[in-house]
Amino acid sequence: MRSGGGYVRTKAVIARKTRVPTAGAWEAIRGIGRLDVWFPGISSCRVEGNGEGARRYMTLEGGGDITDEIVDIDAANRRLRYGRPESPFPVSYYQGTVEVFESFDSLAVVVWTVDFDSEPEVAPGVAAALEAAIGAGVAGMEQDLQVSHLVRET
C-alpha cells in the first residue's frame, strides 16, 4: 500500500504464545517499561508519565535514541498502542500495537504489530529487522517474568 511522498506502508507482525499467564503478561506490557531488559540491543529505557501520553525513552547499544509516545491503553481488550516520533530507523511513520490474548490453557499469546512508512527499497529489510527484534523482545519479556517471579503459576 502506498502512502504519501513515495513511501509505502508496511506491516510487521509477531504472534507468540508464551509460558506465562495472560494477566502477568498484560501487566508487564501495560507497565510500558523494562524494554532494556527484554530487548537485546536496548541499553536503557526510562518512562515519563503514566497511561496515554506517557513517553518511553530508549537508547540503543550501538548508538541512537528512540522515543515512544503511548497513544492508548485499552485494559478491557488488553491492547496498548504507541507511536514512535523519534528513532534512527529509515521510517517516516511508525505505530506499534501490542495485544495480549488468552489461550485455551490461560497462557498469554502476545501479538505485536508495527505499521510503518518507508521508502519501498528498504521496507523488506526494516520489516525483517522489526520481526526479529520484536520476537527477541517477547522472548525476553517471557524470560524476565519467569525469572523475576512477577508471574505466579496458575
Image (tube, rainbow, N blue to C red):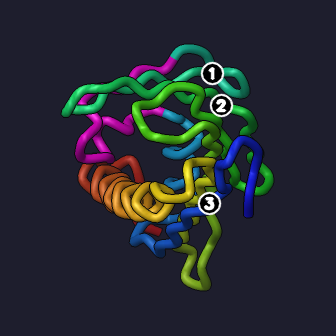
For marks 2 and 3 on the same chain, the one whose residue lies earlier in the sequence: 3
Q: State whether residue 142 appears in this view.
A: no
Label 3 sits on a secondary structure element that is strand
Check residue 10 in the rendering and tell me which mark sits there, or answer none. 3
Of the two numbered discs 3 and 1 in the rendering, the one whose residue sits closer to the viewer: 3
Q: Position of residue 51 (x, y in %)?
A: 68, 27
In the picture as drawn, the residue positioned furthest to the bottom comes out as: 104
State the image quarter where residue 82 is shown. Answer: top right
Read off the residue under disc 2.
70
Residue at 75% x, 37% y: name it: 72
Q: Position of residue 5 (x, y in %)?
A: 71, 41
Read off the residue under disc 1.
54
- How far separated are the C-alphas under marks 3 and 1? 25 Å
Q: Is residue 71 left or right of residue 37?
A: right
Residue at 67% x, 56% y: name it: 9
- How far separated are the C-alphas under marks 2 and 1? 5 Å
Label 2 sits on a secondary structure element that is strand
Q: Residues within 10 Å of mark 1 (few under 14, many from 20)?
A: some
- How far separated are the C-alphas under marks 2 and 3? 21 Å
Identify residue type, mark 3.
Thr
For marks 3 and 1 on the same chain, the one whose residue lies earlier in the sequence: 3
Q: Nearer the viewer, residue 103 or 129?
A: 129
Q: Nearer the viewer, residue 37 or 88?
A: 88
Above or below residue 97? Residue 89 is above
Identify residue type, mark 1.
Ala
Asked if the residues shown at circle 2 and circle 1 are in contact, with their CB atoms under 8 angstroms apart, the answer is yes
Residue at 48% x, 58% y: name it: 121
Q: State whether residue 35 appears in this view.
A: yes
Q: Which residues are magenta?
A: 33-47
Q: Residues within 10 Å of mark 3 (few under 14, many from 20)?
A: some
Q: Does the segment drawn in magenta span residue 36?
A: yes
Q: Residues within 10 Å of mark 2 (few under 14, many from 20)?
A: many
